[in-house]
Image (cartoon, helix red, strand yellow):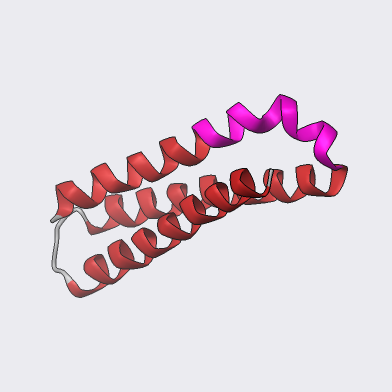
């Protein structure tokens, strides 16, 4: 179980780092799509926060709650990281 929780926390940490990188990129750029990009960053932060809160709530409930949420959390964390990675690749 702790490997699973560690994995989720690593994924969310990597998302945090990517969001920070993207934020710095757009703050320093004169990109015409800056407003759109910052809105996308806001959505990514919200997805991250929502997943983080749901994981914390499941931790409080104990291990019996993890079995039904395990796949869902992993898929969401992976999808969030993939979305951010793809987006960062596009912006350079």
Residue 91, percent from left and from top? 16, 53
In the picture shown, does residue 23 fall above or below 91? below
Please give the name of the residue rendered at 24% of the width and 65% of the height, measured from the top-left corner: 26
**Residue 50 appears anywhere in the view:** no
Residue 18, percent from left and from top? 34, 59
Seen from the viewer's position, the closer of residues 32 and 71 is 71
Locate the N terminus by quadrant.
top right
Residue extending furthest bottom? 28
Q: Which residues are magenta?
A: 62-75
Please give the name of the residue rendered at 74% of the width and 34% of the height, measured from the top-left corner: 66
- Relative side of 48 to 54, left or right: left
Seen from the viewer's position, the closer of residues 20 and 37 is 20
Q: Is residue 59 magenta?
A: no
Please give the name of the residue rendered at 86% of the width and 42% of the height, measured from the top-left corner: 61
Report how many numbered discs are placed on residues in the image.
0
- Relative side of 8 to 38, left or right: right
Q: How would you classify the magenta stretch by its main secondary structure? A: helix
- Relative side of 36 to 32, left or right: right
Residue 71, percent from left and from top? 59, 27
Seen from the viewer's position, the closer of residues 4 and 59 is 4
Residue 51, percent from left and from top? 60, 44
Seen from the viewer's position, the closer of residues 71 and 34 is 71
Locate the C terminus by quadrant.
bottom left
Q: Is residue 66 magenta?
A: yes
Please give the name of the residue rendered at 44% of the width and 48% of the height, measured from the top-left corner: 44
**Residue 30 appears anywhere in the view:** yes
């Amino acid at each position: 179980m702790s490997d699973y929780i560690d994995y989720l926390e690593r994924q969310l940490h990597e998302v945090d780092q990517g969001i920070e990188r993207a934020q710095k990129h757009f703050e320093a750029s004169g990109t015409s799509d800056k407003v759109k990009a910052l809105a996308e960053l806001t959505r990514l932060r919200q997805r991250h926060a929502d997943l983080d809160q749901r994981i914390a709530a499941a931790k409080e409930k104990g291990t019996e709650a993890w079995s039904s949420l395990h796949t869902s959390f992993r898929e969401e964390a992976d999808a969030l990281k993939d979305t951010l990675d793809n987006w960062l690749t596009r912006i350079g």
